[in-house]
Each structure stands twice: as C-alpha cells, then as structure tokens.
Amino acid sequence: MMDFTLWDIVRNLLLAARWTVVLAVATFVSGTVLGLLVLMMRVSHRRWPRRIAWAFIELFQGTPLLMQLFLAFFGLSLAGIDVPAWLAAGAALSLWSAAFLAEIWRGCVESINRGQWEASASLAMGYLQQMRYIVLPQALRIAVAPTVGFAVQIVKSTALTSIIGFTELSKASTIITNATFNPFTVYGMAALIYFILCWPLSHASLRLERKLNAPHRH
Amino acid sequence: MAYRFDFASIADYTPVLAKGLGVTVELIAFGAVAGVAIGIAAAWARTEGPRWLRPCITTYVELIRNTPFLIQLFFIFFGLPALGVQLGEMQAACLAMAVNLGAYSAEIIRAGIAATPRGQYEAGASLAMTRLEVFRHIVLKPALARIWPALSSQIVIVMLGSAVCSQIAAEDLSFAANFIQSRNFRAFEVYIVTTVIYLLLAIVLRQLLRLLGQHLFRRAPR
C-alpha cells in the first residue's frame, strides 16, 4: 500500500485545483456574455423581454444551484446529448451566474441618472447606442467591485460540480480522503486552497469599492 | 425515440418528499435563528468587544466567507471526528449552516451598526447606560432594521445552499429527490418537482421574512 505524505496530498489537491480555476474562469466569461444579454432584456423598454429576463433571474436565484446542476446533467442527456460532467457543470454554472450578474448590473444601470438617457435620446441615439456609449461606460465603474465580489461566489460554487462527478478540488479531496482516511487534513487543506483562491478576490473587491466609489462616500 | 415525461410515478413518493421538505424547513429554521444569533454576537465583538477578540472574529468571518459551504460541511462532518467531536448528520448540517450564516450575517449586521449616528451613543451614555446597555437597547434594533433586507436575502441564499446537506446524508429535500430517482429512475421529473418546491419555499420564506421585518421594526427609526 502506498503511503501519502502531506506533500502528496497537497500536490494532488493543487493539480485538481487547476480544474477549479479553469471551470471558474470559463463560467465567469460565459456568465458575463449571457449576463449582458439578460441585462439588455431586463432593462429594455419593451415589456416581454423584460418579463422573460425577470422570470429567468427569479428562477435561477430562487432555486438551489445543486438542483440546477442535476437538471442540466439529466436534462441534457434526455435531449439525446451524451453529457460529460464538465459540460453539464459549465452549462448550469453559466446560466446561474448570468442570472446573478444581470441582477447586479441592473442595479448599476438603474443608478445612472435618467437625464443621461434623455440627453442621449435627444441626440437621436438608439437604445443600443445609448447603452454602448452613454450608460454602460458609467455603470461599468460602479459594477467592477460587486462583479469581482461575485467572482468569489463562482469559485466557491464550482465545489458543487463535484457532486455530479466533475473532478475538481472538492472531488479530489473526497477521493484522497477515501485513500488516506485523513479527512481532517485533506478537507482542511482543500479549504485553505479555496481560501487562497478567493481571499485576494474578496480583498480586491473591497479595495475597488473604496477606490471607484469615492464620490459616493460620506 | 422521444422522451415521455412521467410525473405520475412521483406521486407515490409524496410522503418521502414531504418528509424531506420537513427536514429542510427544520434545517433552515435552526440555521437562521442560530446563524443570526452568532452574527449579532460576532458583530458586537467586532465593534464593541475586547480588542484581543477582534482579530479572532475577523479570521472566522474571512475563513467562512472565502471557502465553499460544501467543504465546510465535509470538514465538520468527516474532519472533526479526528478531534474527537462526533456529530450526527443533522447536527453537522445544523452546525455548518449556523456557522456559515453567522459569518455572513456578522458582516451584514456590522454594516448596520456602523451606520449608527454618533449622537445615539452619546445620548445613551448621558442616560448613564453602560456600553452593553446602549448596544442592547439603542444600537441593535435600528441596525437590524437597516440591514433587514440584506439579511433576509442571505437567509434565503443559505436555505438554497442547504440542498448540499444531502451529501452528508442529512435527509432533506434534495436527499429525498436523490432517493426517489434511485428508485424510479425518473431523475429529470424528480428534480423538476424538487426544484419547483425549492422555488416555492424561497418565495414563501422571502415573504415570511418581509412580514417578520415589518412586525419587528414597525416603530424603529431608520
């Protein structure tokens, strides 16, 4: 039987942590693209896109991510696609993060003074132009800090994908625990690695908030 | 071959779902009360408590906020027995939820306390109240009233997160779903039904918390 030293545990956890990072980055990118789409619909002047976006956000914010993962995992395979765990994980996480990001950004867009919309409308700008040149650049400044903050949630949420069988940091922890019978060290180390991934982001979010929101401080 | 949905096969398992729902409600009821209590204590310790206690609280809050709930749960359930702390799955789940919500609510409540006008402290002191009395009677309630919406959404988030507790075999709603689909192989239908139950639970919980907020903070100044 093979003996696991502490270094063996850490090394294997770090190898698995690469997949946590890859999944988190992929989720953040696709969630951002989708989230922008949902945002556009959510703040649209037309009623139906607004309602659809609202329902989408309510659905994904009001149900457990774990259930969304299961539904993606079993649902996609019903559609005749043979789903590997990473695909189901990526799909569910992207939709979930799109809903949260859209809602975060909606707050930022709505905090932009109505006069900005009116001024740009009086310059004969269309909806997309108003968004592109006037509103989004200003909203972006306010949005940076909470968006970075949400990136922490994404990293933490990737842990759930271990349950549908994607081998990332949490799954690796369970596998290593089963081999070493030392859950205290293994889960402790896994927690530490998550902390090392997340804490700089949390800290950056806090600092960005202080820096970029200077005019709003009391 | 097109897939045929079969929701009828779940009807037989209604008692299983009901039991799971009961356990989820139990978890969130305990988790919310204990979590907010920890949050208030931690927020007090961080703003008013002895100086040596503050870094400890900060460490607790940062550690919990920057690690996944699943790992916290596994650490408590599988890891703590190494220190001689044996917990059943329900105890571990309750503890994990309370500790998790405690850290988030500590941060939220602290923000509410930080917004207390200086004059309130001075007014309390001029009535010969001790610092603890000022905190208890003057600072806390308006602080909670200020951050109640944020605290409510955090409680809902923790409730949804409790689905993970099925992974340590706490027999909650998602455990019931796993159990049913292992029996009738109707995974997609079972998870749709369970997801809808969670959605309804979230809506009901949000309304209950809103009503509770209205009831608790009716006359509290904002």
Image (cartoon, coloured by chain):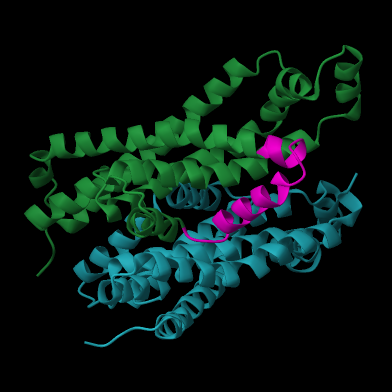
Chain colours: A cyan, B green
Looking at the picture, tell me which residue is in the foreground, B91 or B182: B91
Residue located 59% across and 50% down the image? A46
Within the magenta stretch, is there residue B53? yes
Left or right for B188, reference B112: left
Main SS class of the magenta portion in the image: helix
Looking at the picture, tell me which residue is in the foreground, B132 or A190: B132
Q: Position of residue A72 (x, y in %)?
A: 31, 64
Left or right for B200, reference A94: left
Residue located 81% across and 47% down the image? A114
Q: Position of residue A77 (x, y in %)?
A: 22, 70
Looking at the picture, tell me which residue is in the foreground, B60 or A156: B60
Residue located 24% across and 45% down the image? B193
- Which quarter of the picture shows residue B11? top left
Within the magenta stretch, is there residue B120? no
Quadrant where the N terminus of chain B sits is bottom left
Quadrant where the C terminus of chain B sits is top right
Judged from this view, the residue extending furthest toward the bottom is: A2
Can residue B166 be seen at all in this image of the molecule?
yes
Q: Which residues are magenta?
A: B43-68
Picture mark count: 0
A24 in relation to B110, above or below: below
A211 in relation to B222, above or below: below
